[in-house]
Image (tube, rainbow, N blue to C red):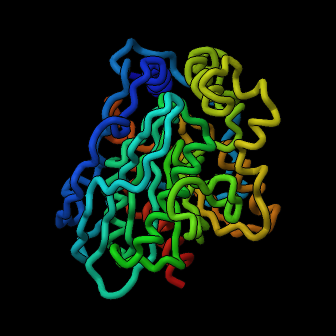
Amino acid sequence: MGALAVVAALAVAECSGGSTGASPSAPAPSPSTASATCPSSLAPANPPAPAGAAAGAAPQVKLVVPVDTSTSTVLKPDPAQQLQCGKVQVDTKSDVAFAAPKLANGQAKQLLMDIQVPQTPGPKPLVVYVPGGGFVQDDKQGNLPLRTYAADAGFVVASIQYRVQPDGATYADSIADVKSAIRYLRAHASDYQIDPGKVGVWGDSAGGYLVAMVGVTNGDKQYDLGENLDQSSDVQAVVDKFGASDLSKLESDYDAASQQAAAGLMTVVGKYVNGPASTQPASATPATVAAANPITHIKPTDPPFVIFHGSADTLISPSQTLMLQNALKAAGVQSTRYVVEGAGHGDLSFTGDTKSALQWTSANVAAPLLDFLNQSLKG
């Protein structure tokens, strides 16, 4: 299946009303502790295929805008040289409930996280991982190799769920959920050996968009809702991997056939920006889509960013992170952008592309991520 079919599949998942998050009526799973080392297979675990993922072949996606690397560093992945870990024992506490926000239908959705804690002395910096999923999924089990790589290097890593569009959520709800997770972890810092003064966020795709929004809204209390409001949701570092910026222009860099085929996704995005009852695309509401754009919120005091994007990404155009990078730099915010040559949109193994993840787990691509976390959170 072509990459564009994934876009269509995500839209089908939205239309079906399904969500991979915890059921609003399900009881809380009992937290469990397990010892974990680096996974034996460094290719990330396959996410569940979205509804409709077995649909017929889609047209080949074509970027019609050249990839601009003028303000970025180009990385050439070497899939033969994979990241290594296993230096320390990493314990995992799974299915920790951190919030139960209300959905559009009035029911509560219990949000869960998996927390990896390296067994080293003293409090450790925290990295909150926000998974992608086209705003319709929130699989906290994804990207295990890279999460374990960070935990092995001495970071507590918490992978979280958040409300998604099939829940009737908007982008503001998802941001509030990420900030709720940060506050929860600060409130329970001693339970998980966390240094509450050193917190970073890291997200892929939709998660990349959300962590960018979280980083540039440090101190903005409109997104601080729910429990643990005596704790700060501010972060000290942001890792944005192939996330969007302007949600009204997600398809604008692709050819006409690709734009037409992405209509279902843009319907999802319109609802995610404007609300579940909206029938308008995000582009029809300039003021609202501007509020949903991290660039709108940038200020000189924002935390440092590191940004990654594949040059062959056929789901989120590289121009989306380029816009963010240039705006951050213009405002005086510390930001470095890496373009991974030939890489696509992360792990697409559930489409049959079993090699896509290996570019992102290449040692020379993973190393700058770890370097940034070390400099930002351990310095």
Quarter of the image where the C terminus is located: bottom right
Residue 337, image x, y percentages: 63, 58
In the image, what residue occupies the spot 61% across and 21% down? 267
Left or right of residue 148, residue 259 in this image:
right
**The quarter of the displayed image where residue 27 is located:** top left
Q: Residue lying farthest bottom?
A: 121
In the image, what residue occupies the spot 31% across and 87% down? 121
**The quarter of the displayed image where residue 306 is located:** bottom right
Residue 192, image x, y percentages: 34, 73
Quarter of the image where the N terminus is located: top left
In the image, what residue occupies the spot 21% across and 66% down? 37
Left or right of residue 216, residue 127 in this image:
left
Residue 287, image x, y percentages: 82, 36
Please name whichever residue, 226 or 163, is drawn nearer the observer in this view of the structure: 226
54 versus 361 height, above or below: above
Residue 227, image x, y percentages: 50, 59
Please name whichever residue, 86 or 227, is drawn nearer the observer in this view of the structure: 227
